[in-house]
Amino acid sequence: MQYTLGKTVTYEGTGLHLGKPVRMTLRPAAADSGVVFVRTDLAQAAPIPVNVAQITTTMRATALGSGDVFVITVEHVLSALHAMGVDNCIVEMDSPEPPVADGGAADFVALILQAGIVEQEGRSRLRHLTESCAVYDDAGDRFILAVPYDGFRVTFVSENPHPLLGTQVVDVDVTPASYQREIMRARTIGFTYELDKLRAMGLAQGGNLENALVYSETECLSAPHYPDELVRHKVLDVIGDMYLAGRVQAHIIARKSSHQLNTELAKKMAAQWAEEE
Ligand SMILES: [Zn+2]
């Protein structure tokens, strides 16, 4: 079986990085069509299918493109769709970036639940990994790997030099229930001393103390949603980035991984599946 939404739903807000107002509409889609982004603000823009071939940049956020048309910071809405088991969906946006919403994926999960999830005819799109694969960064202290697993599980080790953060570890067997309980409310982290630099680069324009977990040198300025919210958000991002390879069935194990490493692993897994088909 495959799954899509029961009806069309809409959410209005502001993008995290570009800070632009955006209206995002999630529509049911036909079996075997996958998840597709459509820019409704551009006349006759080609739809952007969610797969590894469309990845453009992974600086601070994951971006997808097709020709001149692009969408950025897609990982949180993809995380919600992946974890809730939605195979086919059209994501329309009248701006390049989805709404930051709650800063995690809780508002997107609420939106998906409001739409309802319905079964469709068609062969399951779950993709079982048969061989391990891994990606290491050049310095060697960051990695992400995937091993065969009956289900979808993510283990993440985060290490941050900030005195209030340090080492955080989370291990979660990803199901709609565990995702809603343990992951979806975890927000992006931000540091006050990085903010000027990010804003000068045109990033984090839509971030604030409510939709991001913000730290100064000595304290947390936001009210935390989880004691280890940083690493839980890293898991949220991994679940979103892995959806570029499909409905992943594997155990993902990562240390200090970034969008760049995440998407490289997604490419390796997608290549393995392409070879098997
Ligand atoms: Zn994120």
Image (cartoon, rainbow, N blue to C red):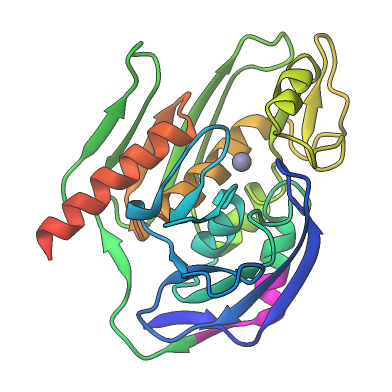
Residue at 74% over, 37% down: 226
Q: Nearer the viewer, residue 253 or 196?
A: 196
User: Which of the pair 44/21 is nearer the observer?
Assistant: 44
Tell me if 269 is positioned left or right of 201 in this view: left
Image: 197 above or below 128 = above
Is residue 271 magenta-colored?
A: no
Where residue 39 appears, x then y in whole percent? Answer: 59, 67
Visible residue check, residue 173:
no
Q: Quadrant of the C terminus?
A: bottom left
Image coordinates of residue 54 in percent, x first then y, are 39, 54
Q: Is the magenta stretch mostly helix, strand or loop?
A: helix
Q: Please, which residue is most extreme toward the left here?
A: 276
Among the 4 quarters of the image, the one containing residue 247: bottom left
Residue 112 shown in magenta: yes
How many numbered marks have been drawn onto this rendered protein structure?
Answer: 0
- What residue lies at 60% left-to-right and 80% top-to-bottom? 27
Name above or below for residue 194 compared with residue 119.
Answer: above
Left or right: 66 with respect to 69? Answer: left
Q: Is residue 144 above or below residue 162?
A: below
User: Looking at the image, in which quadrant does ligand 1 appear?
Assistant: top right
Image-based side of 261 in relation to 83, left or right: left
> In this view of the protein, which residue sits in the foreground, 235 or 53?
53
Q: In which quarter of the image is the N terminus?
A: bottom left
Is 50 drawn above or below residue 153 in the view shown? below
Look at the image and give the residue range highlighted in magenta: 111-118
Residue 259: % across, % down: 48, 36
Image location of residue 151, percent across then percent down: 36, 57
Residue 45 showing in the rendered view: yes
